[in-house]
Each structure stands twice: as structure tokens, then as C-alpha cells.
């Protein structure tokens, strides 16, 4: 065999060199790869060739390939090898470990890795049953040298990873190996610690071999890290916590400190029972804490990764402290103070990542029932507030150099967008910690916030010298950019103040509230004037935060309202024709939102100023171009919210009539006949006209007025309500009667106005749906041919693309005619459905009892669905159908809506499923469009199934009498199990399918229907079975259906027999137990589920990455840990310890 082996080795060496040569052509490289793969699969003398190629005399790439051959043999041929060849291969492999490698510092890491894999693959197949001395042989290898010791460490680590972490073995083999490891864990840990101690000592003593011993020390620590996570906690604390002591000492060793910190972090982060974790308190000992804190102080920027690990160690210590401490007397006060100051040091470190790492621990300490009351913690809360004042300032962008944090950010973040996303999360964590601290020291927190606010008001605005790409225009105008020093300082202060003030009113008694100081701050804010939109936005937030103080000094209310109204019409440059920047738009929107919030939360307080508010709104509305439609709607909503405090039906109804008079006149005028015809409507809004950019669109005023009408109707129907108190409602004339069950029937004061406007609203919805018909699509001009497409913002949201974050506030928002038209159609469509949805909530029976309402909605909202794009269906599903009518109107209203909708959805998904199977080469834009369309279909179907999963009981109630709707619903639910959407599959399988099917199993289902339902579940397993969550839900669903329907439908067995590789004998046994439970041996529920899971295992599909992977088969060995079966006997039968009665009889010893 020697000559053929040598000849084959020569060929293999040439092939490997061709594959690894950068200058080889692709054809030669593929041929060489094919030759090598065929050799591994077919050649009868792989082992001798592999051993010859693995010889030290060969190059590293050849040796690596030789070792790969041996690994391949063990993984795929081991089961068929004679025992003698297995022993020979094992001995050769051990020989390679002992003498087949170069010294530790010279050997390549990938050679060591594959050698460790070879040994572990044999261990997984033979230990402990056929290789009982494996651990002793590994220990013996460590006496040869450092290279062998490192390899043994790598073998033990990989074994733990394969068995425990990745679980790449069959269950029985994994159980055998894990239990054997557990039984020997005491000796394994002792061995690992001895190796670590020995080589650390040698590392400290020797000079020439220091690097070699250091390498072994690193390997030992890495191996320990693989075991610390799962072994019994007792092993970590044995021998007076020797392991933890060694790890703390190693924190001072520069070359070993990172790995030691990793091990310490894993150990401290362990969960478990309180008693098991108590020994970890040794780490709060003065000595241990000294080493940890000394390491933190000595680490510098060059050891940044170690510093991050050490920070995590301290934070985990803090979390364990909160869990373990029952009494403060158990802690050393000095150590506790040192620990807190170390947290504070990391909280004030220039690295934003290190700062953020401490936040959860601070929050836990501030919430702790015992620790939060300690004077030391209370003092630390004040220091934390001061540190937060710095940390809330958004600095440290990796692309900039204006802060010490920037250098660290370049290590932690790939881009400014990543940093911005991180910082938003970091800020939210700080807000939570501040609020927790304010529950304990609210007045101290308020004092700091007040000082900071006063300081910002008195400090001149600094716009900075540099900005982001679009900042130069704003800076030239003397305005802040989003990254200007003053902007980030105001932003940070505003967030802090908002977090603090909100807790004052929750945690301080009314008598002790700092009302005078709060009003003083409010006056300072009211008197502060600025034309900078970013600063003004912060001012408005502070105004909203401090507004609760106004309830104690009502005479300040008019000043607050005037300040807000001035901001609603804010402009940087008066009468400028240039588009407003986003910052200016945000100020105006912010002011509107503040008025709505105040009107919602304090309507009783604002009611005396209602006339002032109403007159101011009339004044603003007199100039049609002064406010946008959304701003007008916000003011209308505020007025309606306050009018709810009239608590007088007649008075509120008269006010709403007056408020809506202009809108009602326009909406019902002859001009609005354009809402009835698509052609007239397109002409009215100008979508059929050619427009050049830079020219005014004469029909823009029509769109504006139309939007205002819809906005107004929405604002009124959403906000108008009757009093919550029944007695007040009766006194105000809002109660018209009572239901048979005694519940009051209310009337809404906006009902007459809304019902009068409803016909044209439904006409607009119908016309909007008809716009997508081909004959109307062609009416669009070339300028607006894409007017119905997804707007850019929504497109990015659907595709999961990030929005730009740094320069969106500073540049004017120039919109093309097309973008304006897209926004108009999108907003109008959404608002129409919002009105319909809110009408049910607001008007109740006055809306639900409209004659022919269901037919009107079907004839408008559900018309021409075949042509309506998916992104238009989403608001209809989400908004309209999310508002379920009360139960008595299910059959008359909801069923007529759901019937055609579900039939349509079933057709859409059937069509889409065909498209999903197509595979064509497409251009990038086409691929993106297809991705968008597929994702939209997925989102639309989720909306439908959200509808079902949110109230599945209600669906069954309304649908059972209506067979057509019910069967369509069942069809959608079971078909959706195999759609390419794992989230939908899991929810439907676990919450919908059986809930619906259970209602009809008692009826006369056709056998074809039953087999289709069951086959649909199996098809879902084929599509999604590789995902554990889906597999569990689908398997449970299949089990329930089979157990409930198999006794009545023999056809289910024929479905089961078609499953690939099914064990028919096992199927017969399962059926026998199911059909004849009395005669069959009883089986536990878990065992029965496992049996069924094995029966249908052949249906479980594989993901693409696993479909062409060669399977590794590891045979089970005779189990070492079989539990002895207990003999069954009568429990009261006398035994060696006596009878059952004797156990409860008193004895002399018990007395």
C-alpha cells in the first residue's frame, strides 16, 4: 500500500497547492477541489494518506488538509470502521498530539484547532463507555510540554462547547457525556486550576519561556470560561473560593487580565438559588475588591477591551449585591463605598459605551428596597444626577473630534447612525435611573434641574463653529444646528428636567410641593424669547413639564396660552416664501401638541379661559394660509376636549355646530359633487394636469380645503365625548335610555353633524378605491403617474431602512409636486378610515344603527379591492376593522364586512404564493420593488391575522352561523401556516387554527376537508419546521387535530403513511392507544407527544443552508445511567420499615 499512498499524497499536495495559490485559475481551482472532495468520499486509504500529509515535514496548508481528512473519516466513516482500525486511528491521533506538532509559539493556530476537533470527534463517539481513561490520558499529555497542555485545554473546551453550548450530539450521547463530565467535574476543575496555577507561576518566574507559559495560561482561562457558565456553583466556590481568588489576582497581569475578567464576569453573572449564590459575597471582601478596583484604576486606553469587561464585572457584582443583600450589616461600609465610586468612575469615563454599561445597575440600586434607603446611596444619587448632566449631552460622534468620547466611539460604532441609535437607548436608560432616584430624593433632583434650567436661560446661545453637512445655511443665519453646543445642552437639560419634574407630583405631598420655585422657573421660561427653532422647541417642552405648577397659580394660565399661540405661528423669517425647515415645523407642531395635552389632562382647569382660547383660534383661522391643515385640526381637537367639560348636551351640541359650520357648508355643497366621480375628483385636485417644477399649482387650494374638512371631521369625532360620571351625564342630557341589561345609552353631541357628513365621506372612500381602476389610472398626468405609490418614508419603514439622523432639521423641506400629491392621497385615505373607525367608538348605537350601514361600507371601503394596492389596504384593515362593534351588531354589521374581505385575502395570498415560487434574474430596482411588494403582502396578511388573534373568541361567535365566512376564515388560517412568514405561522398555529376548527369538529365535516386541514399543518412543518418555535406550535396543533379527528376519520392515517421515513409499526401502536385506550398500555402525556413528534419528523423541512449538508450520524452507546425500575407493590403492604400505618403512629422517641 506504501506506493499507492505516496503517489496519492503527491497528487493531493499538488491539488492543495493549486487551491491555495492566489494565481491559480478558477477552472484549475475547481478541478483541484473536486479531486480532493472525491478523494475524501471514495478513497479506501484516507487514513494513511491523512497521516502522511499531517507530518510535521509538510507545509502548514498540507498538514491542515491531512488533518481534515482524518476528521472527515471520523465524522462520516467511523460507524463502519472495524474496531482495530478505530483503535489504530485513535493511537495515531494521540501520537500527533504528543509529538506531531511544533513548539507552542511556532505552531499555527489552525493546526491546533483541527487537532483538537479530531480528538473531540472521537470522544463524542466513544467516551466514556469505550474510552474510560480519556481524562487520564489527557492529563498525562500535559506533562510532555506546553504545546500539549494547550492542546488538551482546547480539547476540553471544544468538548464542553459541542455537548453543552451547541448540543451537536444525539440526546442520549449528550446525556451520557454531560453526566460523566458532571461526575468528574471536581477532578476536572482541580486539574484546570492546577494547570493555570503552575503556568502562571512559571510565567512570573521565567524570562525565556514566559510567552509559552502565558499562552498556556490564556488557554486554561478560555477553557475555564467554557465550564464556569454551566457547572454547579459549588465548583466555583470550592476550596475557599480558590478559583475566584485566582481570577482576582490575575486581573493585575497585563497578558492574562482580559481572559481572567471574562471568567470572572461569567461566574458573577450566574443565576441560581439564593443559598447557592451566597458564597459569591466573598467578592465583596476588602481584598477581592481591592484587586478589582486596582485593575480598573491601572487600565488605560490601550487596554480598552479589558476596561469594558471590568466594567461589566463591576456591574454584575452590583446586580448580585442587590439580589443577595438582605441587610446592610452584611456589607463592609468602606468596600460598599469603594464599589459605588467605581461605578461612578465608569459613569463619568469619556467612553459613552462604558457610561451606558452602568445604567442598569444604577437603576437596580435606586429601586432596591433596602439599599435605596441607605445614606451612602442617597448621597450617590446626588452625584449621579450631576454625572447625568454631562452624560445626557449628545457628544462623541465617531466622525467628529469635538469631544474625548469621539476616539472611543470610533472603536465601538461603525457610523454616526449607529452611535445615534445607541445614544437614544442610552438616554432612555438614564431617564429611567433618574426617575428611580427621584422617587427617593425628588426635591434634590428638582433643585438640580432648576439650577440647570436657570443656567441655560442665562447663558448666551453658542451656535458653534462646525456642523453637519447641511448646517452651514443655518449657522450663516445665526441659528443652531442639531449638533451646536447650545442645542445639545438645551436638549440634555430639557430631558433631565422632564424626567425630574414628572416625579415631583407623584412622590411629594401637595403641601410640600416647591410651588413657588416651580412658578419662578415657569416665569423664567415664559419670559425667555428666542428665534432659534431648536432652542424654542426645548423651551416649549419645559413649559409643558412645568405646567402642573400653574394649577396652583391659575392667574398664569393666560400667559402660558399666549406663549403657545405665538409658537404655533412661529417663523424664522416673516413672510418668507421659502419652505420651512423641519426644526420650524417641529416648533409649530410641538406647540399644537402641548395645547392638546393640556386640554386633555387639565380641561377643567382651562375651561375658565375657554373664550380666550376660542377667540384666538378664530383669529388664526381667519387667515387661511397662516396654519397648515394639521395645525388647524390640533386646535380644533383642543377646543372639543375642553368643550367636553360643559357637561351640557345642548350647549356642547350648539358649540360643535358653530365650530363645524364652515366645514359642513363646504362638505355638503354642490362643489363636493366631485367626490362622486373619479374623473371629476382627479381634475379637482389637479392630478390630471402636467406641472413643471417651480410653478404654483392652482388646484393646491382645493386639496388644502378638502384635507381641512376631513381633518376637522376626524378631530371632532375623535375627541367629542359625554361625561364619564353617569350622574353628570344624566344631568347634562347625554343619557337617552337604558338597555335591557340596565346599561345606560348615551348620545354624543357631535352625532347630528357627523351623520350629516357621512354620505360624502363614504363617497370619497368609494371614489378613492375606484381611482385604481385601469380606466382611471390612465387619467393621471405624466407628472403624477406615480402619485399612488408608497411614499418614501413609508417605503423605508417597510423595508427596514434607517432614516438620516443628523442633518434633517436644518435644511428647508423642498417637496416636488409629485411628493405633495403622494402625501395628499396617503393622508386623505388614512384619515377617512380613522373617521369611520372612531365613529363607532364615539357615536355607538347612533352609528351602528344607520340603515344599510354594512351595505354602504361594503359599497365604498370594500369596492374594487382587486385593484387597490396592498399599502392602501393596511390602513383599512388596521384602522377600520380594529374597532369591533358591540356584540349585538356582529351579525348585522361585521359579518357582511368580513365575508368579502376574507374571500379577497384568500385570493390575494393564493396569487402571491405562485409569485413567491418564481425565480428570475432582475435588475436591482426591480428586486427592491419586489421586496417591497412581498413585504407589504406579508404585512397586510399579518393585519388580518392580528384581527383574528386579538379577539379569536369574538370571531367564532360572529361566524359560526355563517358557514361561508367561517370556512373562508378556516381556509385562510390553515393556508397561512405555509406562507413565508414565521411570525405569522407561529401565531396562527398557536392561537387561531384550533380555536376555529374546534367549533366545527362536532359537525359533519367532509373527509376531504379534514385531510386538507391536517395536510396544511404538515405543509407548515415542511416550510417552517426548522425553526424551534414554529415546530413546537405546529407539532402541538397536528397532535390535537389527529387525536380529536382520527377516531372519526380513517383518512388521516393515509395522510400519515405518506410522510417520508415514517415507522408504520410505531404508527399502528399509536393508533391502537388512541382508538382503544382501555386495552392499550397507558403512556404519559410527554412520552405520547414525543412518540407523535417522531412519527411526523419526516415532514420537517430544512433551511437552505442545511439542505445540501452531509449528515453526521453518531451512534448511541449502551447507556451508563439507566434508572432501575421500582417493583410495584401495595403502598400499605408491610415492608422493612413497617407498614404505612406505623409511619404515623407515635413512638417513644417522638414524644
Image: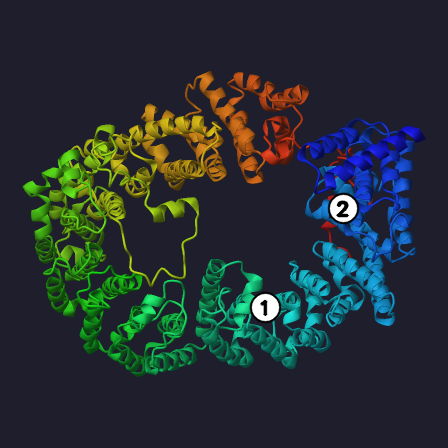
Front tag of 1 and 2 = 2
Q: Quadrant of residue 319?
A: bottom right
Q: Secondary structure at mark 1?
A: helix
Q: Position of residue 112 (x, y in %)?
A: 80, 49
Q: How is the image coloured?
A: rainbow
Q: Residue at x 91, y 49 (%)?
A: 99
Mark 1 neighbour density, 10 Å: few (under 14) some (14–19) many (20 or more): some
According to the image, label 1 marks what residue? 322
The percent coordinates of residue 12 (x first, y second) are: 81, 34
Q: Quadrant of the C terminus?
A: bottom right
- Nearer to me, 336 or 312: 312
Between 372 and 874, the one lying in front of the other is: 874
In this view of the protein, which residue sits in the foreground, 493 or 534?
A: 534
* SS assignment at label 2: helix
Residue drawn at x 79%, y 30% as measured from the top left: 39
Horizontal side of residue 605 vs 920, given as left or right: left
Q: CA distance from mark 1 to mark 2?
A: 33 Å
Instruction: Evaluate whether residue 736 shows in this view.
Output: no
Q: Is residue 184 above or below residue 290?
A: above
Where is residue 337? Give x, y as percent. 61, 79
Mark 2 lies on residue: 178
Residue at 64% over, 81% down: 334
Residues at marks 1 and 2 touching, judged by CB atoms closer than 8 Å: no
For residue 687, above or below residue 1095 = below
Name above or below for residue 597 compared with residue 766. below
Residue occupying the point 64% across, 65% down: 305
Circle nearer the N terminus (1, 2) = 2
Q: Position of residue 1120 (x, y in %)?
A: 82, 40
* Label 2 Cα crowd, 10 Å radius (few <14 / some 14-19 / many 20+): some
In the displayed structure image, the side of residue 681 where residue 278 appears, left or right: right
Can you see residue 1127? Answer: yes
Amino acid at each position: 500500500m506504501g506506493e499507492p499512498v505516496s503517489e496519492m499524497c503527491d497528487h493531493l499536495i499538488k491539488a492543495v497547492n493549486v487551491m491555495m495559490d492566489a494565481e491559480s485559475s478558477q477552472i484549475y481551482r475547481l478541478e483541484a477541489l473536486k479531486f480532493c472532495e472525491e478523494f475524501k468520499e471514495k478513497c479506501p486509504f484516507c487514513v494513511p494518506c491523512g497521516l502522511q500529509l499531517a507530518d510535521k515535514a509538510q507545509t502548514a496548508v498540507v498538514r491542515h488538509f491531512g488533518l481534515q481528512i482524518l476528521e472527515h473519516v471520523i465524522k462520516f466513516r467511523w460507524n463502519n470502521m472495524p474496531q482495530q482500525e478505530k483503535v489504530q486511528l485513535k493511537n495515531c491521533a494521540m501520537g500527533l498530539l504528543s509529538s506531531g506538532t511544533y513548539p507552542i509559539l511556532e505552531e499555527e493556530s489552525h493546526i491546533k484547532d483541527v487537532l483538537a476537533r479530531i480528538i473531540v470527534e472521537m470522544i463524542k463517539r466513544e467516551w466514556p463507555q469505550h474510552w474510560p481513561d480519556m481524562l487520564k490520558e489527557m492529563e498525562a499529555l500535559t506533562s510532555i510540554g506546553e504545546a500539549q497542555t494547550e492542546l488538551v485545554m482546547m480539547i476540553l473546551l471544544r468538548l464542553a462547547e459541542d455537548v453543552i453550548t451547541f448540543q451537536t450530539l444525539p440526546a442520549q450521547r449528550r446525556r451520557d457525556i454531560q453526566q460523566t463530565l458532571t461526575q468528574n467535574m471536581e477532578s476536572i476543575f482541580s486539574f484546570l486550576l492546577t494547570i493555570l496555577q503552575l503556568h502562571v507561576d512559571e510565567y512570573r518566574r521565567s524570562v525565556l519561556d514566559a510567552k509559552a507559559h502565558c499562552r498556556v495560561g490564556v488557554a486554561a482561562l478560555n477553557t475555564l470560561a467554557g465550564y464556569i457558565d454551566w457547572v454547579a456553583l459549588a465548583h466555583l466556590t470550592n476550596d475557599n473560593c480558590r478559583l475566584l481568588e485566582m481570577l482576582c489576582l490575575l486581573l493585575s497581569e497585563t497578558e492574562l487580565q482580559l481572559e481572567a475578567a471574562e471568567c470572572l464576569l461569567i461566574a458573577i453573572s450566574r443565576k441560581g438559588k439564593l443559598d447557592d449564590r451566597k458564597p459569591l459575597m466573598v467578592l465583596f471582601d476588602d481584598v477581592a475588591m481591592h484587586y478589582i478596583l486596582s485593575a480598573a484604576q491601572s487600565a488605560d486606553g490601550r487596554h480598552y477591551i479589558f476596561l469594558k469587561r471590568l466594567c461589566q464585572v463591576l456591574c454584575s457584582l452590583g446586580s448580585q449585591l442587590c439580589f443577595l443583600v438582605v441587610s446592610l450589616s452584611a456589607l463592609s461600609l468602606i468596600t460598599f463605598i469603594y464599589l459605588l465610586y467605581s461605578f461612578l468612575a465608569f459613569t463619568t469615563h469619556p467612553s459613552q459605551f462604558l457610561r451606558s454599561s452602568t445604567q442598569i445597575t444604577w437603576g437596580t440600586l435606586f429601586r432596591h428596597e433596602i439599599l435605596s434607603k441607605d445614606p451612602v446611596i442617597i448621597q450617590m444619587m446626588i452625584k449621579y444626577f450631576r454625572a447625568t448632566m454631562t452624560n445626557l449631552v449628545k457628544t462623541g460622534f465617531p466622525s467628529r473630534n469635538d469631544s474625548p468620547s469621539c476616539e472611543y466611539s470610533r472603536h465601538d460604532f461603525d457610523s454616526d447612525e449607529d452611535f445615534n441609535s445607541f445614544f437614544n437607548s442610552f438616554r432612555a436608560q438614564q431617564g429611567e435611573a433618574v426617575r428611580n432616584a427621584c422617587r427617593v430624593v425628588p426635591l434634590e433632583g428638582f433643585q438640580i434641574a432648576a439650577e440647570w434650567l436657570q443656567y441655560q436661560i442665562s447663558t448666551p446661545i453658542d451656535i458653534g463653529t462646525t456642523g453637519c453637512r447641511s448646517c452651514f445655511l443655518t449657522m450663516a443665519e445665526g441659528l443652531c444646528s442639531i449638533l451646536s453646543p447650545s442645542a445639545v445642552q438645551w436638549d440634555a437639560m430639557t430631558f433631565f428636567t422632564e424626567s425630574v419634574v414628572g416625579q415631583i407630583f407623584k412622590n411629594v405631598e401637595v403641601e410640600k410641593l416647591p410651588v413657588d420655585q416651580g412658578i419662578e422657573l415657569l416665569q423664567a421660561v415664559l419670559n425667555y424669547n428666542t428665534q432659534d427653532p431648536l432652542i424654542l422647541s426645548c423651551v416649549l417642552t419645559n413649559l409643558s413639564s412645568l405646567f402642573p405648577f400653574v394649577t396652583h397659580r391659575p392667574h398664569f394660565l393666560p400667559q402660558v396660552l399666549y406663549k403657545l399661540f405665538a409658537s404655533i405661528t412661529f417663523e424664522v423669517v416673516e413672510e418668507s416664501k421659502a419652505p420651512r425647515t423641519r426644526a420650524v415645523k417641529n416648533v409649530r407642531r410641538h406647540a399644537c401638541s402641548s395645547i392638546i395635552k393640556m386640554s386633555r389632562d387639565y380641561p377643567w382647569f382651562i375651561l375658565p379661559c375657554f373664550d380666550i382660547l376660542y377667540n384666538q383660534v378664530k383669529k388664526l383661522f381667519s387667515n387661511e394660509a397662516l396654519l397648515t391643515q394639521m395645525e388647524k385640526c390640533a386646535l380644533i381637537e383642543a377646543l372639543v376636549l375642553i368643550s367636553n367639560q360643559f357637561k351640557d348636551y345642548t350647549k356642547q351640541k350648539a358649540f360643535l355646530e358653530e365650530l363645524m359650520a364652515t366645514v359642513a357648508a363646504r362638505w355638503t355643497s354642490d362643489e363636493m359633487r366631485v367626490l362622486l366621480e373619479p374623473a371629476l375628483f382627479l381634475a379637482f385636485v389637479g392630478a390630471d394636469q402636467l406641472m413643471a417644477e417651480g410653478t404654483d399649482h392652482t388646484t393646491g387650494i382645493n386639496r388644502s380645503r378638502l384635507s381641512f374638512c376631513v381633518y376637522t371631521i376626524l378631530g371632532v369625532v375623535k375627541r367629542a365625548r359625554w361625561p364619564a360620571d353617569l350622574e353628570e351625564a344624566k344631568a347634562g342630557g347625554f343619557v337617552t335610555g337604558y338597555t335591557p341589561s340596565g346599561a345606560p345609552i348615551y348620545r354624543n353631541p357631535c352625532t347630528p353633524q357627523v351623520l350629516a357628513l357621512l354620505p360624502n365621506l363614504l363617497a370619497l372612500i368609494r371614489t378613492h378605491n375606484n381611482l385604481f381602476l385601469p380606466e382611471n389610472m390612465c387619467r393621471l398626468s405624466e407628472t403624477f403617474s406615480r402619485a399612488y405609490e408608497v411614499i418614501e418614508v413609508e417605503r423605508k419603514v417597510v423595508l427596514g431602512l434607517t432614516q438620516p439622523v443628523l442633518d434633517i432639521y436644518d435644511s428647508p423641506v423642498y417637496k416636488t409636486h409629485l411628493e405633495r400629491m403622494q402625501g395628499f392621497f396617503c393622508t386623505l385615505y388614512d384619515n377617512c378610515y380613522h373617521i369611520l373607525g372612531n365613529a363607532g367608538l364615539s357615536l355607538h348605537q347612533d352609528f351602528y344603527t344607520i340603515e344599510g350601514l354594512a351595505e354602504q361600507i361594503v359599497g365604498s371601503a370594500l369596492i374594487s379591492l382587486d385593484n387597490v394596492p396592498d399599502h392602501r389596504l393596511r390602513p383599512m384593515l388596521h384602522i377600520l376593522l380594529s374597532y369591533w362593534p358591540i356584540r349585538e351588531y356582529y351579525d348585522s354589521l361585521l359579518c357582511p364586512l368580513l365575508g368579502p374581505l376574507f374571500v379577497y385575502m384568500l385570493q390575494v395570498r393564493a396569487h402571491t404564493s405562485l409569485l413567491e415560487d418564481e425565480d428570475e434574474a432582475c435588475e436591482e430596482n426591480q428586486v427592491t420593488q419586489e421586496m417591497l411588494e412581498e413585504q407589504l403582502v406579508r404585512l397586510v396578511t399579518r393585519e388580518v391575522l392580528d384581527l383574528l388573534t386579538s379577539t379569536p373568541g369574538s370571531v367564532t361567535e360572529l361566524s359560526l352561523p355563517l358557514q361561508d365566512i367561517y370556512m373562508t376564515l378556516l381556509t385562510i388560517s390553515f393556508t397561512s401556516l405555509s406562507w413565508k412568514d414565521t411570525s405569522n405561522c407561529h401565531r396562527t398555529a398557536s392561537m387561531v387554527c384550533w380555536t376555529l376548527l374546534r367549533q366545527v369538529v362536532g359537525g359533519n365535516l367532509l373527509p376531504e376537508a379534514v385531510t386538507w386541514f391536517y395536510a396544511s399543518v404538515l405543509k407548515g412543518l415542511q416550510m417552517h419546521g426548522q425553526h424551534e418555535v414554529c415546530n413546537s406550535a405546529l407539532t402541538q396543533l397536528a397532535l390535537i387535530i389527529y387525536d380529536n379527528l382520527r377516531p372519526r376519520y380513517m383518512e388521516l392515517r393515509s395522510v400519515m403513511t405518506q410522510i417520508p421515513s415514517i415507522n408504520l409499526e410505531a404508527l399502528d401502536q399509536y393508533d391502537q392507544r388512541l382508538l382503544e385506550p382501555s386495552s392499550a398500555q397507558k403512556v404519559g402525556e410527554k412520552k405520547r407527544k414525543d412518540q407523535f413528534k417522531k412519527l411526523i419528523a419526516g415532514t420537517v423541512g430544512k433551511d437552505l443552508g442545511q439542505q445540501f449538508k452531509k449528515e453526521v450520524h453518531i451512534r448511541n452507546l449502551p447507556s451508563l445511567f439507566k434508572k432501575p425500575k421500582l417493583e410495584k407493590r401495595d403502598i400499605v403492604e408491610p415492608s422493612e420499615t413497617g407498614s404505612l400505618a406505623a409511619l404515623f403512629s407515635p413512638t417513644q422517641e417522638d414524644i
